[in-house]
Image: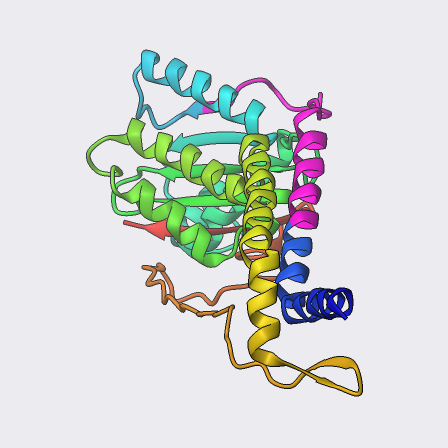
């Protein structure tokens, strides 16, 4: 009889905590999948040999020579880690109005449209992209310092395009704007770090994944040991189990062992033009004049 009670207790515990076991199993599978994904990505070498090695085009003369070199070093380090191309272009050129359209051959008289075209076309014409030279992975910031038409456009491509929605683009531009008027070098560093921070969120590091996996397994063992001990089983049987016809049966379950709480957080953003988020297709998804897929957004000052 005692052995039957223990078997029934184990069966009831497994049934009672089956949701917990399913959650643990899902976490383990997710961690393993992310580990494999990051391992493969870390071993990925640059596949695009068409693009130039230059990443900083300071046509607007916003940086000192030392700042340009420091920015190149920082970009190279982040590109190697996140497997994306990162490009900065500064300029001082009118991009708005009929005169500018006629002088420079823009397809529009509007500031935002022309900034988008200039950024996308620069990326396409130079064949940037970590994995390939057309629709490859990466981002470009175009900063225009022409008086009365100042502002920046963030152009995204490949994995970066589809990782970013409009809230993410606004967040990067917000970081740039903190230093836009006071320290252009820090503004461009903020662009690089902002893009990479977002890409890092969708690609956990191997150390983080290992800690998550180990933590999950430890939590499972501790939880199981503390809730499935023979003594606890005996107490549970004594209180909740009755025998009918010589077979144990659990009549009721009154304890609640697992509580779930859902916290919702509303994030305020300071978008420049009231654009809506596009979570499935990338922020500002569109086609450039060359037919390449891009995302992005602008911020005028």
Who's the residue at 50% across and 30% down the image?
87
Q: Tell me, what colour scheme is on the image?
A: rainbow
Front residue (pair 134, 162):
162
Look at the image and say whether residue 49 sits in the magenta stretch. Answer: yes
* Coordinates of residue 243 in the picture (x, y in percent): 71, 83
Task: Single out the residue that lies furthest toward the front.
Answer: 1
Give the total number of marks visible in the rendering: 0
The quarter holding residue 39 reads top right
* Coordinates of residue 112 in the picture (x, y in percent): 43, 54
Who's the residue at 44% across and 31% down the image?
89
Residue 262 against residue 163 in the figure, above or below: below
Confirm whether residue 291 shows in the render: no
In the image, 284: left or right of 159? Answer: left
Residue 84 against residue 98 in the figure, above or below: above
* Coordinates of residue 82 in the picture (x, y in percent): 57, 31
Look at the image and say whether residue 83 sits in the magenta stretch. Answer: no
Q: Which residues are magenta?
A: 28-56
* Coordinates of residue 54 in the picture (x, y in percent): 53, 19
């Amino acid at each position: 009889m005692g052995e039957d009670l223990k078997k029934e207790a184990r069966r009831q515990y497994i049934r009672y905590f089956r949701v917990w076991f399913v959650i643990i199993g899902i976490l383990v599978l997710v961690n393993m999948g992310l580990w494999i994904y990051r391992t493969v990505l870390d071993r990925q070498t640059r596949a695009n040999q068409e693009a130039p090695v230059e990443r900083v085009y300071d046509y607007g003369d916003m940086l000192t020579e030392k700042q340009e070199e420091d920015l190149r070093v920082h970009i190279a380090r982040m590109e190697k880690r996140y497997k994306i191309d990162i490009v900065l272009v500064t300029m001082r050129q009118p991009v708005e109005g009929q005169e500018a359209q006629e002088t420079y051959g823009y397809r529009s008289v509007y500031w935002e449209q022309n900034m988008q075209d200039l950024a996308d076309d620069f990326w396409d014409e130079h064949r940037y992209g970590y994995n390939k030279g057309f629709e490859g992975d990466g981002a470009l910031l175009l900063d225009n310092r022409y008086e009365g038409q100042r502002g920046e456009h963030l152009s995204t491509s490949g994995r970066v395009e589809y990782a970013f929605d409009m809230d993410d683009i606004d967040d990067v531009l917000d970081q740039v704007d903190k230093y836009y008027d006071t320290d252009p070098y820090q503004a461009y560093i903020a662009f690089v770090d902002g893009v990479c921070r977002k890409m890092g969120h969708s690609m956990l590091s191997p150390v983080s994944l290992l800690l998550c996996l180990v933590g999950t397994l430890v939590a499972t063992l501790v939880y199981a040991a503390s809730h499935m001990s023979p003594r606890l089983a005996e107490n549970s049987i004594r209180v909740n189990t009755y025998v009918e016809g010589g077979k144990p049966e659990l009549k009721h379950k009154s304890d609640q062992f697992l509580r779930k709480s859902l916290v919702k957080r509303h994030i305020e953003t300071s978008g420049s033009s009231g654009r809506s988020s596009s979570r499935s297709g990338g922020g500002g998804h569109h086609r450039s004049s060359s037919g390449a897929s891009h995302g992005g957004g602008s911020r005028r000052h």
